[in-house]
């Protein structure tokens, strides 16, 4: 599976694990077992780096996704936030996002509503090939 690329896709994910290793006292993340054991319907917060046409620098935004499925160490989730940027052609509620345990910076257990949401088809699917 191809990972999102800032140049090709206009967005990518920052590694929460790398940020934690650089700043362990000030940037805490869930333990590895928690990050690697997410189930459909669970919530995961990720750090998105998003290109913005008018700016030379991309914006960085932390947003929640709802886990849809796990396959070969990769999760697929549905974006559960609306990004706070004016021009946005890539992200909206329900967009499928691929990510790994290393990207997860916060976790919340799922509930019946989030499991139902996770079972829906994404509004925009990530290419799997």
Image (cartoon, rainbow, N blue to C red):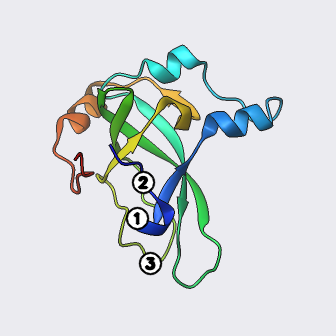
The front one of 128 and 33 is: 128
Q: Secondary structure at mark 2?
A: loop
Q: Secondary structure at mark 3?
A: loop
Q: Where residue 82 sits: x, y (%)?
A: 42, 59
Which residue position is annotated with label 3?
87
Seen in the image, is 58 located left or right of residue 21? left
Q: State whether residue 8 is above or below residue 25.
A: below
Question: Quick check: marks 1 and 2 in contact, CB under 8 Å?
Answer: yes
Q: Where residue 116 sits: x, y (%)?
A: 21, 33
Seen in the image, is 35 located left or right of residue 91? right
> Which labelled disc corresponds to residue 4?
2
Residue positioned 37% across, 43% down in the render: 98
Q: Secondary structure at mark 1?
A: helix
> Which labelled disc corresponds to residue 9?
1
Q: Where residue 14 sits: x, y (%)?
A: 58, 48
| Residue 9: quarter of image | bottom left
The front one of 126 and 116 is: 126
> Which labelled disc corresponds to residue 56?
none
| Residue 120: quarter of image | top left
Residue positioned 33% across, 26% down in the render: 72
**Alpha-carbon span between mark 2 and mark 3:** 19 Å
Q: Where residue 16 sits: x, y (%)?
A: 62, 38
Decide: few, some or many residues near mark 1? Use Cα within 10 Å; few <14, some 14-19, many ≥20. Answer: few
- Disc nearer the start of the sequence (3/1): 1
Which residue is outermost to the top?
33
Quadrant in the picture for the N terminus: top left
């Amino acid at each position: 599976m191809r990972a999102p690329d800032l140049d090709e896709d206009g967005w990518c994910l920052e590694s929460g694990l790398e940020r934690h290793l650089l700043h362990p006292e000030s940037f805490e993340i869930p333990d590895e077992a928690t990050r690697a054991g997410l189930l459909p319907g669970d919530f995961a917060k990720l750090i998105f780096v998003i290109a913005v046409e008018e700016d030379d620098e991309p914006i960085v935004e932390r947003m929640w996704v709802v886990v849809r499925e796990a396959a070969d160490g990769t999760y697929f989730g549905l974006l559960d936030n609306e990004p706070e940027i004016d021009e946005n052609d890539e992200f909206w509620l329900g967009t499928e996002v691929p990510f790994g345990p290393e990207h997860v910076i916060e976790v919340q257990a799922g509930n019946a509503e989030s499991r139902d949401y996770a079972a829906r088809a994404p509004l925009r699917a990530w290419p799997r090939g």
